[in-house]
Image (cartoon, helix red, strand yellow):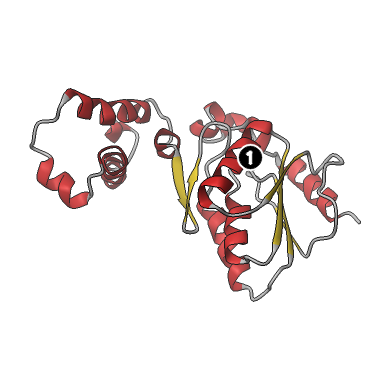
Amino acid sequence: QLAARYPEEEVRAILRSVFQERMGWDAAQLVVKRFESMSESELLKVYLPLKRLVAGEPLQYVLGEVHFHGLRLQVDKRVLIPRPETEEMVDRIVRSGIVPSRIADIGTGSGCIALALKNSFPRADVVATDSDQGALVVAMTNGKRTGIQVQWELGDALNDGFPQGSFDLIVSNPPFFSDLTVSPDPVRRLGRHTATLSPGDLLEAVGRLLAP
């Protein structure tokens, strides 16, 4: 049934991930044990995640975590799944040669950007904000599980909730869609609608962030 949703190679990668996370099997063990019988408890460990995947739920939500810039972070329906281009943005900042002393992450979501930048610039003070309490709880949980110290703040940075003080690096990477009705299914059905911006919203957001 997964083959109806994903290409063959992606199905194999998904199965490897599920069996590794739920059973502790690596790729070699999966090959060796594929013809062995499994107990009922073992079957349930992999059946329930696979059932959710067949229903269209993203792998990261099913497993409850994602790997981002060397960090293992929790994700669930309270936050959007970090995108490859978000990790690329962090890479570019780290490779740019700048050494920021104070960083603001606006709309932090899972906290992936703030935590990755703090991990890369340990001497920097990092402040991360989000207007959604649920998202901020996820970000704070990720801060605790990684042991990385970030200042978390609840507030809408685009409506008088911008963190206090001056910053030499301000980052924000919210996703946007021209029409939410044609956005990818997992985002439309499962992700945070409040985290998505239309092109007009995005331009307004950038203008507010850059305003003196």
Q: Position of residue 160 (x, y in %)?
A: 87, 41
The amino acid pointed to by label 1 is Phe
* Residue ID for mark 1: 177
Q: Quadrant of the N terminus?
A: top left
Report the front residue among 40 and 183.
40
Q: Secondary structure at mark 1?
A: loop
Q: Residues within 10 Å of mark 1 (few under 14, many from 20)?
A: some
Residue found 61% across the figure and 32% down from its top: 192
Residue 89 makes an appearance in the image: no
Residue found 69% across the figure and 64% down from its top: 124
For this orientation, the residue located farthest to the bottom is 97
Left of 66 or right of it: where is 54? left
Q: Give the answer, above or below, for where 135 lies relative to 148.
A: above
Report the front residue among 22 and 89.
22
Q: Give the answer, above or below, for where 29 lies relative to 126.
A: above
Count of numbered badges drawn on the protein = 1
Q: Give the answer, above or below, for where 125 lies relative to 2.
A: below
The image quarter containing residue 199 is top right
Q: Quadrant of the C terminus?
A: bottom right
Left of 101 or right of it: where is 3? left
Left of 49 or right of it: where is 184? right
Q: Position of residue 97 (x, y in %)?
A: 64, 76
Q: Position of residue 181 (x, y in %)?
A: 59, 29
Report the front residue among 15 and 118.
118
Left of 174 or right of it: where is 206? right
